[in-house]
Amino acid sequence: MGAVNAGIARLVGALVDLLAADGWEGAGIRSPEHWVCWKANVSRARAEGLVRIARRATELPECWALFTAGRLGEDAMVRIARRVPAERDAEVAALAPRLLIAQLDRLLRTLPELPDPDALPRPEPERRFDVRTGRDGMVRGRFCLPADEGALLDAALTASRDAEFRDRNGLDTEAEAHPAAVDGEARLVTWADALVRMASAALDGLDPTLARTGHPGDRHQVVLHHDIDPDGSLGPGQLEHDAVVPDWMARYLACDAKVLAATYAAGKLIGIHPTERTPNRATRRALARRDQGCRHPLCTQRRWLHAHHIIHWEHNGPTSPSNLVLLCPYHHRLVHRGMLSIDGDPEAGTLRFLDPWGQPIEPPEVGTPPEPPPRGTPHRHGPRYTPPLAEPLQHHSFVWN
């Protein structure tokens, strides 16, 4: 890495001479960044970072010396060039080689981004939110919000993630949402889980029927349309005003939810399936007492569980305790995607979970971890690069002088 860093520093040194002599100017060339994109065959974002370093090389001599010696990488130097003023050069140079990029970001976030008078002005980003459904049925999107609205979104996602973590790990509402508050191994929650939880809470909060009666209204009911194939079987399912979903997802949606399934033949509605497939409250209480949480051998979630049909409803599987098992949403999706399988009778104690290769899933045995593989002597050509310390960086670890 030291040789790589020093090589990139030589490239940036050439850009310093190029900018001083205006050597980038030519027919059709709009900016130095445009020239670097062409000549170095790099992306626009990387070209902007390299030119930004070159423009500030003389203002940051201490950091530039570390860069040319191979002790600072390109990513670190770009961040320093964007935010560190000249009077902070020595101070940052003493810290940067010991920090990870994430820690350096956290440190430099307290400094405002410096304007680049030589860069072309950019238009103000448009406030937008785009969502699309891909050919694989996955929903993807991107958004752009101003800082104040972004802070509101971040606060809502953080609150949703904390609430989901407490529910998955059986913590009280006042408990700290941290793995240290969990006895044993904690079930972690991703930001995708937080987004889904926030959407679910928004639906509940905006549903007047739920606020009035305690039961969700039909306006937020999942509607699944099915065409009947010539052989009489149900064809692909399509969500209302949305894309066709795979068979596993159609079964997952209809497994433990009040789903309104409309069937069509030759484009004509022939029937609307009722929701008897959903276990009633008495059955759910019996399942909760029997299963005491998600039945996956490696899962400890006890709340927000789904009742799964071991034999699917469309395969004449009954809605009875002998054919029902409680699963958390994560393992429920894995079952319907074919990454897990279940057999046996939960009432008789013969329930088994199998991996995609048909092997039973058992709790791991306690033993000595295997020895790490031997490592050879690293090659040491060019400047030596010392990695950061990777120690925790707290808010009180550094104070600007």
Image (spheres, rainbow, N blue to C red):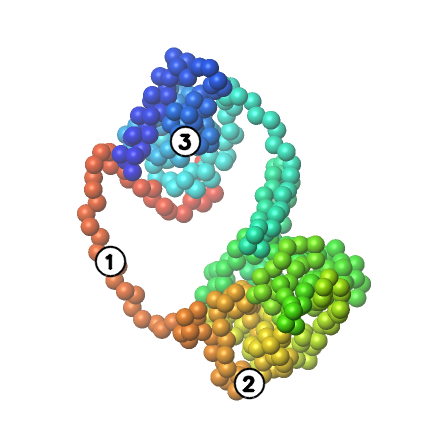
The residue shown at (44%, 32%) is 43
Q: Please give the residue where the numbered disc 3 appears in the rendered image.
A: 42
Looking at the image, is 118 positioned above or below residue 396?
A: above
Q: Name the residue under label 1.
A: 373
**Can you tell which of label 3 and label 2 is closer to the viewer?**
3
The earlier-in-sequence mark between 3 and 2 is 3
Q: Is residue 173 above or below residue 15?
A: below
Q: Is residue 74 above or below residue 275?
A: above
- Residue ID at (43%, 42%): 102
Q: Which residue does the image show at 42% across and 44% down from the upper left?
A: 393
Q: Do the residues labelled 3 and 2 touch (CB within 8 Å)?
A: no
Instruction: Return the residue at label 2.
Output: 347
Is 247 positioned to the left or the right of 114 in the image? right
Q: Is residue 269 visible to us here? A: yes
How far apart in space, not on screen, are marks 2 and 1 (Cα)?
A: 46 Å
**Circle 1 Cα neighbour tier, 10 Å, few/some/many (<14 / 14–19 / ≥20):** few
**Which is closer to the viewer, label 3 or label 1?**
3
Q: Where is residue 112 in the image (x, y as percent from the top left)?
A: 52, 30
Q: Quadrant of residue 54 in the image? A: top left
- The amino acid on which the numbered mark 3 sits, given as a three-letter code, is Val
Query: Which residue is more in the foreground, 366 or 35?
Result: 35
The image position of residue 230, as x and y in percent, is 65, 69
Mark on residue 233? none
**Lower position in the chain sequence, tag 2 or tag 1:** 2
Kind of residue at badge 2: Glu
The amino acid beneath tag 1 is: Pro
Among numbered discs 3 and 1, the one appearing first in the sequence: 3
**Secondary structure found at label 2:** loop
In this orientation, which residue lies closer to the viewer: 111 or 247?
247
The quadrant of the picture occupied by the N terminus is top left
Q: Is residue 170 visible?
A: no
Q: In which quarter of the image is residue 277?
A: bottom right
